[in-house]
Structure formats: C-alpha cells, structure tokens
Image (cartoon, grey):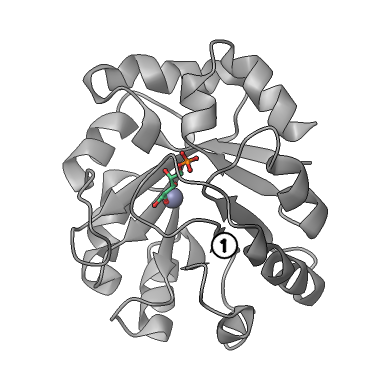
Amino acid sequence: MIKVSPSLLAADFGNLEKELSAVKESGAEFIHLDVMDGLFVNNISFGIPVIKSLRAKSDLFFDTHLMIIDPLSYIKAFSDAGSDMITFHLECNSDIDETIAAIKKENKKCGISIKPKTEAEALLPYLDKIDSVLVMSVEPGFGGQSFMPEVLPKIEKIRAWKPDILLSVDGGIDDKTAPLAKKAGADTLVAGSYFFKAQDKSEAVKILKA
Ligand code: DX5
Ligand code: ZN
C-alpha cells in the first residue's frame, strides 16, 4: 500500500489551516513538514511554533523533515511541538546514534534522510535502529525541482536490505516520476508542487498511489 505525504512547503502559507484540511480530505496519509535553518540548506522555511500551531488544527500524521545542521539539540522541541515522526539528515553535524536515541526517548518514529550524492551504504550501521529512510531525489532546500533518476538504484538497495522499512522518496514526485520510485521500492511518496498545484487533490493522490 503506497502512502502519500504532501509537502507543506508548496502550500499557501497564508492559509495553512485550509491547506491542512485539503490534505486531510485528499486521502493522503501524512503531512510532510520541511524545516530548514539556512545553514544545512540555503533556505529558511518554518519551525517549532508553526508546527505547534498546525498540531492544534490537525490530526494528520506529522512527518517532520529536519534540514538543519544540529538536529540533536532540537529533538525534544520538535517532539513537543507535535511531530509523529522526526527525520534528520545523515549529513548533519549531530552524533547519529545519539540523535536516534533522542527521538526514541520521545517515543516518536525515527527516520534518516540522505542527500542525492550520499551512498545508500552509509545508512548500513543505522538501518536496524530506525523506522524510516527518506531518499532525497533533489538537492534539499527548495520545492519544484526535477527528479533525479540516478537515486533509484539506492532505493532498490535499501528495499532489498530492509523489506519492511518505511521508505520515502522526496523531491520532484509527480505522475511521471512516482511510478519509477514505486518500482524501485519506495512505499511513501512526498509530493509538494504536484499535490498543491493540483485542482483535484484527491485525484492527485489517487494517481500517485495507482
Ligand atoms: C526539498 C524538500 C521537499 C520538497 C518537495 O528540500 O525536502 O520535501 O518540498 O517539493 P517538490 O515535490 O515540489 O519537489
Ligand atoms: Zn522534505
């Protein structure tokens, strides 16, 4: 069963409550929350207080994607804000095992994300300790970029190593690229532009899942 996680980065930030309802009504399972600190990536999005306010308005599963250099220092804050899953980058500056432990201590699902140039093998020491892997199919920092098909073999490898892990792909997902990601073994599709630009969001989710 394929799950869809619309990325709020492509939403209208002046109407977040309405956008959250649209996600809920579309049949998507998750909402993907892209947090950027202007250091790990060249962009700044939103953070802890915004997630906290969204939590008060929505019972969707909050899939928080931390594109920040020091996730360990902020795990408790993102947990308290209402994240259900916290995904951080393998390329960050925090100690990876300590960050996993901090997320587990909060009783949250734990994910690790890798940028397009990071090898799948770099995940091997951690795969038995985490719930999810997020493979970036664009350079993190911005929505609306083109899908990088060269990441597909990494998705195949991770799926072969861990048949049951939640395996998401993030960046440039649309009706053309979703089938490639699914064929490679992804079970969760993060989609920003494709979802929020769609007139009929339920139809967009159906197309991604099909
Ligand atoms: C990029 C973010 C993505 C992004 C996806 O740094 O992690 O989640 O919002 O947007 P689209 O689907 O437009 O590529
Ligand atoms: Zn993301």
Q: Nearer the viewer, residue 204 or 66?
A: 204
- x and y, in percent, of residue 65 in the image: 40, 54
- Give the quarter the ligand 1 occupies: top left
Name the amino acid, label 1.
Val
- x and y, in percent, of residue 33 in the image: 38, 43
Q: Nearer the viewer, residue 57 or 7?
A: 7
SS for tag 1?
Answer: strand
Q: Is residue 100 left or right of residue 169?
A: left
Q: Nearer the viewer, residue 84 or 157?
A: 157
Against 153, is 138 above or below?
above
Against 162, is 209 above or below?
above
Residue under numbered circle 1: 135
Q: Is residue 165 left or right of residue 17?
A: right
Residue at figure coordinates x 23%, y 58% from the top left: 42
Q: Is residue 30 left or right of residue 124?
A: left
Badge 1 crowding class, 10 Å Cα cut-off, few under 14, some 14 to 19, many 20 or more, is many
Residue at figure coordinates x 36%, y 73% from the top left: 102
Q: Nearer the viewer, residue 96 or 6?
A: 6
Q: Residue furthest top?
A: 199
Against 150, is 169 above or below?
above
Rendering quarter of residue 18? top left
Residue 156 in view = yes
- x and y, in percent, of residue 210 in the image: 80, 31
Against 134, is 20 above or below?
above
